[in-house]
Amino acid sequence: MVVVKYIGTSPVESKLGGDNPDPPSTDPHYREMAFQFSYEEQLEYIPIFVSIDLNQFEDGNKPTEIAVFVDEECKGAAVIKDGEVQLNAYITNITDPSEELKEMEFRMYFPGKTASTNVLNYSVLNPQAGTFASRKVKLGATEIPPLPLSTRLYQNYPNPFNPETLIQYDLKDDGQVVIDIYNLKGQKVRSVVNNVKNAGSYTEIWDGTNNNSKQASSGVYFYRMHAHNQTMTNKMLLLK
């Protein structure tokens, strides 16, 4: 999403790419919108990655949309296509709700039902242990996540991707972190991170461009992280 605000009264013409007669471009990416839940989109959001086992539902009675609620108000929804869903939660403008943390609630829409269904049981990934645990997700500034027990580089999401993907990693200790992206020839395409980070969990976004801000070609890429005398590499696929 791009928001452009013009302050003035005279008509103006603005071209994406400036004066470049042939600005870089990429094929448009269309995201199917959820229509069974009403919510307000915002510039900033927190992505929630949901994995749903659709095989547990009978054919013709599978959920088609999932939404997140806070205090009975929908804060985002997404269409369920293949069980892997990025649900954008528009909750960044919510301040510390109170001394008691507010619980986030998930609901799914089934075409054969007149009302949405609450998701009562679900598991949440513990990135430090690498396992899923059954617990509720709460919203609030006082819920401080524990520091990672190890330094770890996760698989990017989504993968394959177009036009951008998320690279998540954990740091057990403070220190210098370097994350670079390489093509199949071993050539460095993009420097993602090269600075000192505190211990914690982080997420970086690669928008599919190289260090010259030009769109990278489709294909297989490797992202490599060097931190705490460790080197970790994962593979990803950029589609056009």
Image (cartoon, grey):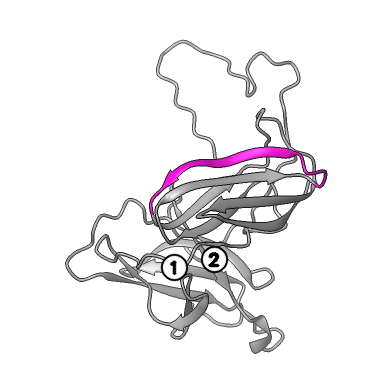
Look at the image and tell me whether residue 224 can be seen.
yes
Question: Please, what is the three-letter code of the amino acid marked with disc 2?
Answer: Phe
Q: Residue furthest left?
A: 99
145 displayed left or right of 194: left
Of the residues tagged 1 and 2, which is closer to the observer?
2
- Position of residue 126 measured from the top left corner of the image (x, y, whole percent): 46, 74
Report if the CB atoms under discs 1 and 2 are less than 8 Å apart.
Answer: no
SS majority, magenta: strand
Q: Answer with the quarter of the image where residue 19 lies.
A: top right
Residue visible at 63% across and 17% down in the picture: 18
Question: Please, what is the three-letter code of the amino acid marked with disc 1?
Answer: Val
Q: Answer with the quarter of the image where residue 109 lies.
A: bottom right
Disc 2 element: strand
- Position of residue 212 measured from the top left corner of the image (x, y, whole percent): 67, 27
Q: How many marks?
A: 2
- Checking the image for residue 169, the label placed there is none
Find the magenta span and give its range. 184-198
From the viewer's side, name the closer residue of 156 and 3.
156
Name the residue carrying label 2: 49
Residue visible at 63% across and 42% down in the picture: 207
Of the 4 image quadrants, the one containing the N terminus is top right
- Position of residue 75 measured from the top left corner of the image (x, y, whole percent): 41, 61
30 displayed left or right of 219: left
- Position of residue 30 measured from the top left corner of the image (x, y, whole percent): 68, 49
Disc 1 from disc 2: Cα separation = 12 Å
> Can residue 190 be found in the magenta stretch?
yes
Name the residue carrying label 1: 68
Say if 93 sits above or below 58 in the image. Answer: above
From the viewer's side, name the closer residue of 74 and 161.
161
Residue visible at 64% across and 51% down in the picture: 224
